[in-house]
Image (cartoon, rainbow, N blue to C red):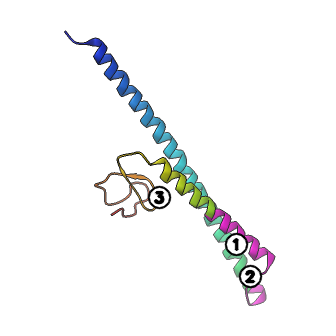
Amino acid sequence: MPDWKNLKDKAMAAVNNAAQEVDRQIALTKLRANVAQAQSELEKALAALGTGVYQSFKSQGTVDMSDAAIAELVGKVDDSQSKVDAAQQALKQGNLGTDASHCPSCGAAVDPSAKFCPDCGKPVA
């Protein structure tokens, strides 16, 4: 005769493990979205800096790095880069405790036998 209590306990443990994994994957997805958003902001800041430098060079024939507008754009790039770094660090910390290895570029969990990251496509080995 089957041990129904044992089977029920095993089933409940499996359900709890699955729920925890779903929660972990949701958290990692949010962290990846934060990284993507921070990278998008950095790209916009770099584009604005490029436009500002171009306009300064076009109008003055040179780029004055002490120009307040250029300095402000450089500050935005620095702030955006800090946000990217913080978001990537949070993602890496969110991946700790798994048995998979991690992508050195984006911090995503990667199967130890994988040659490329499934998230960013960069080589992991």
- Which tag, 1 or 2, sits closer to the chain's start? 2
- Return the residue found at the far right: 68
Dot 2 amino acid type:
Met
User: Is 59 in the magenta?
Assistant: yes
Q: Residue 81 placed where, x, y %?
A: 61, 65
- Which tag, 3 or 1, sits closer to the chain's start? 1
Q: Residue at x 36, y 62 (%)?
A: 124
Is residue 54 positioned above or below 120 on the image?
below
Q: Residue at x 37, y 22 (%)?
A: 12
Q: Residue 122 placed where, x, y %?
A: 40, 63
Dot 3 amino acid type:
Cys
- Which tag, 3 or 2, sits closer to the chain's start? 2
Query: Regarding mark 3 in the picture, which secondary structure is present there?
Result: loop
Q: Are marks 1 and 2 in contact (CB under 8 Å)?
A: yes
Q: Residue at x 72, y 76 (%)?
A: 52
- Return the residue found at the far front: 97
Q: Marks 3/2: CA distance? A: 32 Å
How crowded is the residue under tag 1: few (<14 C-alpha within 10 Å), some, or many (20+)? some
Q: Nearer the viewer, residue 103 or 58?
A: 103
Mark 1 — residue?
A: 74
Mark 3 — residue?
A: 106
Residue 41 has which mark?
A: none
User: Is 95 in the magenta?
Assistant: no
Q: Which secondary structure type mostly characterizes the magenta part of the structure?
A: helix
Q: Marks 3/1: CA distance? A: 24 Å
Mark 2 — residue?
A: 65
